[in-house]
Amino acid sequence: MIMDRLLPALVTPLTLALLAPAVALAQSGGAVVPSSAQSQLLQEGGVALKMGDFGASAARYEEALKLGELNVAYLGLARAQLGGGRCDEASASLARVLSAPRAVNPPVSEVLKDAAALRQDMTSQCPASVIIQCSPVDMSITVDGLGPLPCDGRPLMLLPGEHVLRGERAGERVEQVVALGPMERRHVDLRLGDALLTMIPAERPERPGDPPVEVERPRKPTIDELLAEEAVEEPKEGEPEEAIPAVREVSAPPVDPVRRWMLGAQIAAIVSGDAQIEREFFDNLNEGFEQSSGEDASGVLIEIFAGYRFSRRYNLFFGPKLNVTPEFRIDTTDVNAIPTGTMTDLDFFGMLTYPINERFSLFGTLELGMSFLSSESDQDPIDGANFGGTGGLRFDLRENLSLSVALKGQAYALSNNADVFANETVLNIAGSRTLLTFGVTFAP
């Protein structure tokens, strides 16, 4: 099948210039110790990659390569280019991983395994392409029955597998089948009257008048062969182990897939809080207004939320949130009892996360919604609105599981919506509180 009905051609791979290395060689088999500036750029590239900012990540890795070629820098660059849809450039960068100077850390065997996994990702994400040359040139073509298309020599992007190429002109027809591998680039000559399909490798230069020449290219070593060459033998008994200098470990982080959904739960202890209570009443004999204040003695608040990430570029989630205060209570000297009960908040929130490194992230949230107080002592429904904000620190236990600690501020306003002219007592409560929250977040 043709992917998306023949997408535009992939960008032509860029040739990376060889730059003079600006790093010192370690004493262990020619491995390279990155400079402090290069290590900083590699770390920044990894953080940008984790945030899904593939353009900024690629720029950091390219800056690191200007300070000296390094296998982990090419690996990180290939990941960023693949994430940005630049398949040809990612393939060229990945090829340089095998020939670039290796870093002391991580081990070469680990880099090669990551490179093999990235190559597998490329085969599933990047299409193949074919360029059809027609004779005569005004022939119209169809690919897998889709068309007709002009035979203009432009690359056609296809999924790996077998495809039927058909050319027609003035009632004459030629039909051939071509099998394409993942990310394969192929030139095809389609001629009326020919029984066979002529295929020319895309990388071979074509010069007018040259006869076709079979070029035998040297076989490149496979990933498994390179892994076998890098296998480290255990020292025999009595033999001294080779000393390896202590160096700062520099490695490109694995590709962080964009996780769209986030589920979480938090428990919060109310550190401090206060409230203003107003009562207004009127009857045939009496009318009045009372005001008092008190401290929030509710104890704890439980939160459950679900968020969805709409953007690959920004680590920003939006979604619903449920807050429950099981025992809402205000301590006051007011002779009239303040209603107690369960306070429930139905909110909409937004959360922005900023990674500090591979494990720790800063995050902040804003939330706004409705509040409801269920009280047995008050017959009238008590409801209102609330607004809150949170700032804290998150620690990633695993790729999709995190723990968090944060400070939260919340303000609320509640009323029983009574009618003072119907001899009902109007109750208004306005308060604010500060909470210390502990939570867990799961990204499926």
Image (cartoon, rainbow, N blue to C red):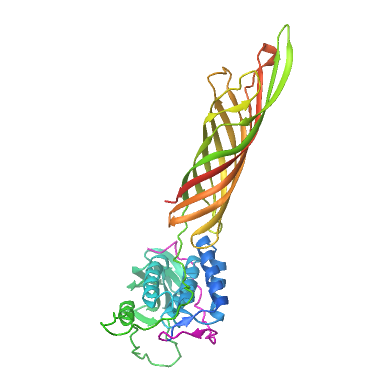
Q: Nearer the viewer, residue 12 or 92?
A: 92
Q: Nearer the viewer, residue 393 or 22?
A: 393
Where is residue 241 shown, x and y percent of the image?
34, 82
Q: Nearer the viewer, residue 3 or 138?
A: 3
Q: Residue furthest front?
A: 238
Q: Residue furthest left?
A: 237
Quarter placement of the N terminus: bottom left
Q: Based on the displayed image, in which of its 4 quarters is residue 121 positioned?
A: bottom left
Q: Check residue 14 for magenta coloring.
A: yes
Task: State which region is magenta.
Answer: 1-29
Where is residue 118 shown, x and y percent of the image?
40, 69
Can you say whether 100 is above or below 148 in the image? below
Can you say whether 273 is above or below 122 in the image? above
Q: Residue furthest bottom?
A: 210
Can you say whether 77 is above or below 346 in the image? below
Q: Nearer the viewer, residue 216 or 102?
A: 102
Where is residue 211 shown, x and y percent of the image?
38, 92
Res 176 seen here: no
- How many marks the image carries: the answer is 0
Where is residue 200 shown, x and y percent of the image?
38, 82
Q: Based on the displayed image, in which of its 4 quarters is residue 114 positioned?
A: bottom left
Can you say whether 126 is above or below 93 in the image? above
State the predominant SS element of the stretch in magenta: loop
Res 120 seen here: yes
Q: Check residue 84 for magenta coloring.
A: no
Q: Which residue does the image show at 62% across and 33% down from the upper left?
A: 385
